[in-house]
Amino acid sequence: MLNMLYRTLLIIICLFVQTLKMEAQGTVSARNTNRETTKQDTAGNVLTLKDCLKYALKNQPTLNQAYVDEAIAHINNLIGFSSWLPQVNGSATYQHYFQLPVNFTVFNGTLTGLQSGVSNISTPSVTASQTIFNTDVLLAARAAKLNTLVAKQNTASTKIELVSAVSKAFYDLLLSVEQESVYKDDTARLKKNLRDTYNGYLSGIVDKVDYKQATITLNNSLTQLKSATEIIQAKFALLKQLMGLPAEKKFEVHFDTTQMLQEIYIDTLEQLQVEKRIEYQILQTNKRIQRETTLYYRLGWVPSLSAYYNYNYEFENNSFSDLYKRAYPYSLFGLQLNLPIFTGFRRMENVRKATLLEHRQDLDELNVTLTINTQYIQALASYKSNLYYLQTQHENKNMAREVYDIVKLQYREGVKPYLDVIVAESDLKTSEINYLNALFQVLESKIDLEKALGNIPTDI
């Protein structure tokens, strides 16, 4: 019978441990599988914003840590629920008496001490207990779903921050790429102007000053082009970091200007709903958890009740060699009731502390609500301002292109001095750079506005 109990105990423990191990490994292996399947996501070497976001949402270390935290929260719930299950323990003792204990008894009216017992006692035993009611396991059961929920909400918050950061980094990189393109076009124009002025100088048509001015202007443009090219590499590195992409991987970015211009608009009449913000949702979940904690301390006076069963397989013999030849088993069942009577005012102070923490979270809610409202107003004002600025810069770019073409033609005909060409060229380059800055400022402010409204998409 003892062997059967030990085997049963061993099977229960093995099954329980294996279940926890499989669940933990399943979560991690699922993440590893996703990571392996996205190793080839950059094989094409040309990525759109959607491609970058997909890769980041599967490979970014911070987000994967959030997934691990979800798995940990689930396992913590299993650990808490384990207290509701029967607890089975095995033990064994061995005792050898050098002198047997004396028991006193009344014999023929006289108190007489007699040695009793045997020299060797060995007792393997199995103890099983079952919690019937306990405030600790009650709190674990009531807070389990909330703990899982707050872990999922933290993951959602990480996703939102990741999508926002990757999108802004992508747009910032595109801005530098487009600026480089503008500087390249500007350099090409200036090189042609330099050739024209140099040939004119050799022919005696153009003054030497025009040739020198063209050279100075070209050198300045080449310096700006070099600076823009170097900045691109730094911004590629930042985007790779946010995506979780290894530094040695190479890729190019791709975007559709027409589609990008169509995506700059957002409904500015949409009303702010604080409940959609993940920060507010997390705070509400934490408030529910704190209310459960307060209830736990308020129920600190409630007694706990458990049942237990002991089975002892006792061996007794004066001779050690014959100790395990015969057993004297016995078993018992009982109930245990624990009633906290006085705990040094600990329960009272814990209730006061928990109540103050609830009040503090109410103040946190007020603060978060005010902060979210301010973020929304600032994001909306920034978006409207940047959108208006984009429209004016678009007009300026078109006019600067028209002015440059006219001035250049007039210069060739000898109507305008070369200084006017330089000024027109500078205005054209500046207007093109300003237009690009305005375009990407609108895109970034749109992200901030979507984030303030709680509308950042994370299902890419």
Image (cartoon, grey):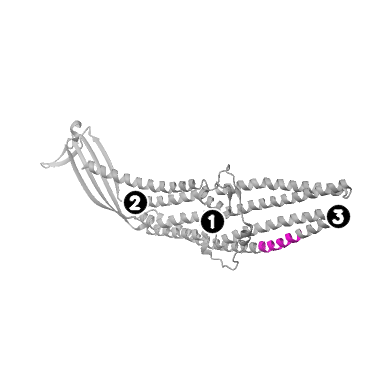
Magenta stretch: dominant secondary structure: helix
Q: Can the viewer see residue 118? A: no
Location of mark 3 (residue): 417
Q: Residue pushed farthest left?
A: 108
Q: Are marks 3 and 2 in contact (CB under 8 Å)?
A: no
Location of mark 1 (residue): 160
- Numbered circle sitting on residue 83: 2
User: Considering the numbered disc 3 on the image, is that residue within a helix, a strand or a loop?
Assistant: loop
Q: Position of residue 420 (x, y in %)?
A: 83, 55
Residue 312: quadrant of the picture = top left
Direction from residue 336 to residue 66 in the image, left or right: right
Q: CA distance from mark 3 to mark 2?
A: 91 Å
- Up-down: is 170 above or below 372? above
Q: Can the viewer see residue 137? A: yes
* 120 vs 150, nearest the viewer: 150
Q: Residues within 10 Å of mark 1 (few under 14, many from 20)?
A: some
Dot 1 amino acid type? Ile
